[in-house]
Image (spheres, rainbow, N blue to C red):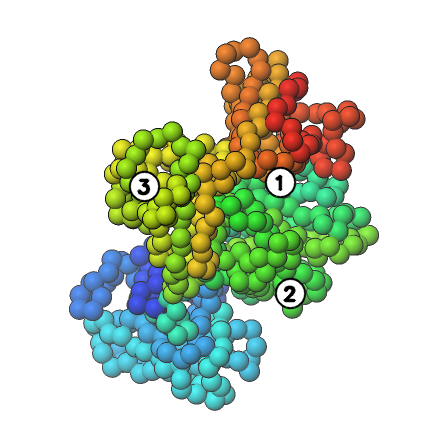
């Protein structure tokens, strides 16, 4: 049996089954290791092992060994390490159930902790079933044994187990545990999706700082400065607000997280470690459904300790247009410490980790009316249809109608809250819209460019022109042309500002005639204006951005970007 003197840093996830959270030791995501305390096992964490008796109620392949040494302290046991990221929700009672395999008659004690002695809860259950698997359940509605405490309305962060609490074992005893089932606080079917935890390539990103002396630098994850409490992980994120930084100084993920933030329901949670009482702010950008950016703040309550803070997606943004994040999916995360607070005269470092989305299983549905204006279309057709992921891209499942013969076709469908891809088609896929990925209402998935809608309430969408993001007659094409002497193998890109983001997205330019002039044409509302820049290469950190500092076309207050004035429909310039 392999032993580790240091905790195994397994990523903790959960499986939601029948509104319960099950840890079955079949994968790293569903494993809770235990760190032993008391006697010669102090500090040891064991690996899961093969099921010694795959029969009866438990035929799974892998289980967890829980060892009590001979003549050890009567209070010896083991605590979860790391603790379950989503915590143990005893808000509405329920049970904790564990499959166990004993070779001798004895008891198992469950203790729940959350950092304060008065809130601890403990219950013991006797087991008389030997040499076969059985299930022991611990009723969370009972008063705790040690202090008569109740679990109602409480969240717990740590699970502690004792085998034969109060009695020293005359000889070494090994029991096996499996399928730890936690209640979810009342049947909501909550699940947790890890966005960033700095432990794997998929859940790691650098932090691209701005608004301070660290501007344009990327800070990689760092060692955990305080491996204790709720966060025993080895690597965390460091957010530095240097002395005399701008009040709005912060950092955004670079590259964007592999898993976007799905704000369909629930909240964003993260573990934070601050050396003062302040705020941590999270901003969502690059909404797939075209929603505006969203930012909210939450205060910490502990100093020099890890704690979990959460922000509900229903909270209105702190910035115009003050709408909630609920219902859309976002690609970019931005973090701020003490947002809009003047910087101190020394560097202030905040650590955060385990950024995750905690979502509810109860997804509401809303009536959404789609309208497409065919008056400017040159297509010949008989019947218009709405085709999307929600009807498996059917060419005839959702017919549209034009009862008043005004050229605007309409249909209403019931859709769950969240983002949905779709497009308008006709005559059972005889034809469909040819959408450009540079259009603001589109998303490109696996090479297919579709419209996307964010559903948060009953909605009657404005009529749009066929194959356009805008009402007929309200848009214009804007063309950017830039001469580049030595183009990068990774492309020339339109980027920057609030509209175009980092290179590598939807705005790659092309030189189809090979004359050294790269172009891209984008449809926007008549009168659109905003900042932009060019990059010679696909560099998410903007290291290959053009350098026009000091020139008349550069705006020093906005990263020396260029500015397109309202009404301009063509730009001709050099890199």
Instruction: Tell me if 510 is positioned left or right of 373 in this view.
Output: right
In the depicted structure, whether residue 373 falls above or below residue 47: above
Q: In terms of secondary structure, where does tag 1 sit?
A: helix
Q: Position of residue 111 (x, y in %)?
A: 44, 77
Question: Are there few (<14), some (14-19), or many (20+) residues within 10 Å of tag 1?
Answer: few
In the depicted structure, whether residue 388 falls above or below residue 176: above
Q: Position of residue 158 (x, y in %)?
A: 48, 70
Residue 3 visible in this rendered orientation of the protein: no
Instruction: Tell me if 555 is positioned left or right of 24 in this view.
Output: right
Residue 532 visible in this rendered orientation of the protein: yes
Q: Nearer the viewer, residue 494 or 347?
A: 494
Q: Earlier in the sequence, mark 3 or mark 1?
A: 3
Residue under label 1: 498
Residue under label 2: 300
- Name the front one of labels 3 and 2: 3
Instruction: Tell me if 284 is positioned left or right of 446 in this view.
Output: right
Q: Earlier in the sequence, mark 3 or mark 2?
A: 2
């Amino acid at each position: 049996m392999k032993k580790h003197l240091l905790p195994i840093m397994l990523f903790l996830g959960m499986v939601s089954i029948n509104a319960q959270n099950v840890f079955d030791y079949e994968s790293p995501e569903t494993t809770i290791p235990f760190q032993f305390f008391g006697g010669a096992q102090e500090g040891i964490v064991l690996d899961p092992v093969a099921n010694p008796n795959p029969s009866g109620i438990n035929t799974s392949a892998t289980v967890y060994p829980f060892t009590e040494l001979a003549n050890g302290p009567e209070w010896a046991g083991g605590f979860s390490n790391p603790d379950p990221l989503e915590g143990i929700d005893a808000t509405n009672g329920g049970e904790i159930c564990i499959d166990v395999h004993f070779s001798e008659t004895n008891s198992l004690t469950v203790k729940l902790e959350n950092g304060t002695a008065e809130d601890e809860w403990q219950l013991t259950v006797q087991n008389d079933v030997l040499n076969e698997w059985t299930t022991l359940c611990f009723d969370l509605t009972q008063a705790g044994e040690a202090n008569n405490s109740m679990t109602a309305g409480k969240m717990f962060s740590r699970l502690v187990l004792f085998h034969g609490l109060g009695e020293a074992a005359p000889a070494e005893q090994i029991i096996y545990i499996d399928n730890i089932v936690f209640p979810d606080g009342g049947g909501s079917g909550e699940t947790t999706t890890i966005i960033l935890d700095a432990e794997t390539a998929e859940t790691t990103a650098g932090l691209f700082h701005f608004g301070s002396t660290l501007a344009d630098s990327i800070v990689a994850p760092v060692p955990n400065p305080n491996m204790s409490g709720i966060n025993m992980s080895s690597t965390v994120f460091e957010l530095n607000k240097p002395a005399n930084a701008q009040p709005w100084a912060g950092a955004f993920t670079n590259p964007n997280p592999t898993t976007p933030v799905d704000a369909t329901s629930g909240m964003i949670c993260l573990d934070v470690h601050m050396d003062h009482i302040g705020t941590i702010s999270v901003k969502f950008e690059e909404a797939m459904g075209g929603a505006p950016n969203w930012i909210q703040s939450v205060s910490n309550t502990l100093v020099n300790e890890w704690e979990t803070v959460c922000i509900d997606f229903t909270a209105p943004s702190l910035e115009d247009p003050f709408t909630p994040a609920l219902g859309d999916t976002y690609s970019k995360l931005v973090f701020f410490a003490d947002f809009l607070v003047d910087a101190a005269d020394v560097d202030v470092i905040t650590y955060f980790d385990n950024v995750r989305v905690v979502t509810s299983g109860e997804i509401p549905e809303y009536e959404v009316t789609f309208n497409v204006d065919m008056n400017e279309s040159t297509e010949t057709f008989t019947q218009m249809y709405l085709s999307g992921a929600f009807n498996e891209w059917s060419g005839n499942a959702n017919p549209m109608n034009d009862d008043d013969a005004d050229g605007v076709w309409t249909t209403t469908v019931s859709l769950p809250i969240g983002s949905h891809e779709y497009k308008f088609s006709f005559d059972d896929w005889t034809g469909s819209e040819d959408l450009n990925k540079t259009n603001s209402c589109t998303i490109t998935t696996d090479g297919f460019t579709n419209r996307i809608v964010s559903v948060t309430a009953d909605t009657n969408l404005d009529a749009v022109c066929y194959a356009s993001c805008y009402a007929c007659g309200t848009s214009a094409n804007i063309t950017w042309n830039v001469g580049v002497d030595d183009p990068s193998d990774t492309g020339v890109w339109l980027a920057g500002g609030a509209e175009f983001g980092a290179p590598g997205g939807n705005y790659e330019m092309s030189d189809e005639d090979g004359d050294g002039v790269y172009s891209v044409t984008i449809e926007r509302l008549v009168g659109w204006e905003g900042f932009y820049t060019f990059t010679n290469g696909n560099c998410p950190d903007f290291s290959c951005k053009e350098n026009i500092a000091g020139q008349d076309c550069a705006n020093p207050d906005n990263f020396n970007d260029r500015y397109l004035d309202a009404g301009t429909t063509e730009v001709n310039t050099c890199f």
